[in-house]
Amino acid sequence: MRTSHTLAMGIGIVAVALVLAGCSAGTSTTTPSSSTSGAPKSLTKVSFQLNNPPNGSNSGFAVAVEEGFYKKLGLDVTIVPGTGSSLTAQLVSSGQATIGYADSTATTQLIAQKAPMTVLSTIYQSNPNEVIALSGSGIKSIADLKGKTVGTPVPSSQASMLPLFLKANKLSTDSVNLVNLPPTSLVQSLLSKKVDAILGSLDTYQVQANQQGAKNLFTATFAANGVPTVSTSIFASNSYITRNPEVVKAFIKGSLQGWKVASTNQSKAIADLKKLWGASASPTAAEELKAIIGGNLLCAGGAKYVGQATPASWKTTQDLLSQAGLLPKGIDPTTYYSNKYLPANSELQACPIAK
């Protein structure tokens, strides 16, 4: 959930997602068609299921559409808004969608349960989760959370990973007073001081708090404080990958071209997002994208390239999520992902991102 504006879209978005994604499941084209001159002769239709409504977190894909990157690679891409990573992962797992975009926690959990799908490219190299507190709360360090009331969005990856975060910082769930809150009331509960802190994220809840006048917030990201897990990724059903390997490669290439523009020309990316989605685009999309780039989400965890998580990051993710009981222990992390559909390293955007 990103903003109150996007929540109102929820029911309609799910309906659209099911219809469009369901239609796409029958697509079976081996390669994007092209003429001998290199220009596409006909375009291969691809439906792409997002995890969220249109906002800064998916602006790179809007760029790929509006700047014609997909079309130049022979693809006619329809982007379907989403209402959460869990639903998107389930849609792909059940065959109602073919290519999706979701947090690694949701996708790897299903893959560990034998869901036939594979992560193809990781955009968020680190989860954006963080603790957020007002400047007058008395919270100036993670240790200061002891005895405080902390609002927790449910369901969420923040809630699932909280025990790991607390343990890594020498606290326990008994050390804080947890209050389960719907995501829509999380920021308001913080601003009205009904809770001392909230479990949010730097690319959404922190943006919302700042937009509503909060200054000098205390923040502590999970990733920088013991819980660095790979996060939002492009993934697809194995049957679709097998039938359409060249389409998958073209889609990944076009998507990463879009994210290169989004990371180096944020104003163009937001303009493309608004051009594609109009009034449906998040009103705080510019601030969200700024937080994503400024928070180093695209190049965290020692990543060498945007879109390609390191084997070490995947191993850390497996270890941490299995400790929390979110994944079975002992699974080889390569079970979850494949880099064979990525462009050559020479074509990928290098980390760190040039200013």
Image: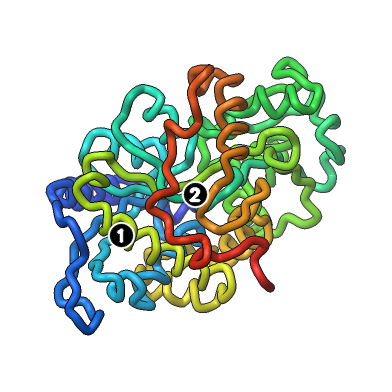
- Mark 1 neighbour density, 10 Å: few (under 14) some (14–19) many (20 or more): many
- Residue drawn at x 49%, y 46% is 232
- Residue drawn at x 62%, y 65% is 290
Judge from the rendering whether residue 330 lies leftward or rightward of residue 79; answer left or right: right
Q: CA distance from mark 2 to mark 1?
A: 18 Å
For the C terminus, which image quadrant?
bottom right
User: In this figure, which residue is indicated by the disc labeled 1?
Assistant: 79
Q: Position of residue 33 (x, y in %)?
A: 17, 69
Of 153 and 195, the residue lying toward us: 153
277 versus 118 height, above or below: below
Q: Nearer the viewer, mark 2 or mark 1?
A: 2
Of 95 and 237, the residue lying toward us: 237
Judge from the rendering whether residue 162 lies leftward or rightward of residue 144; answer left or right: left
Number of numbered discs present?
A: 2
Report if residue 51 is visible in the image.
no
112 versus 213 height, above or below: above
- Mark 2 neighbour density, 10 Å: few (under 14) some (14–19) many (20 or more): many
Judge from the rendering whether residue 64 lies leftward or rightward of residue 142; answer left or right: left
Going by the numbered disc 1, the residue's amino acid type is Ile
- Residue drawn at x 53%, y 17% is 329
Looking at the image, tell me whether mark 2 or mark 1 is earlier in sequence order.
Answer: 1
Judge from the rendering whether residue 64 lies leftward or rightward of residue 189; answer left or right: left
Q: Position of residue 192 (x, y in %)?
A: 69, 43
Please tell me whether mark 1 sits on a helix, a strand or a loop. strand
Going by the numbered disc 2, the residue's amino acid type is Thr
Please tell me whether mark 2 sits on a helix, a strand or a loop. strand
User: In this figure, which residue is indicated by the disc labeled 2?
Assistant: 122
Report if residue 244 is visible in the image.
yes
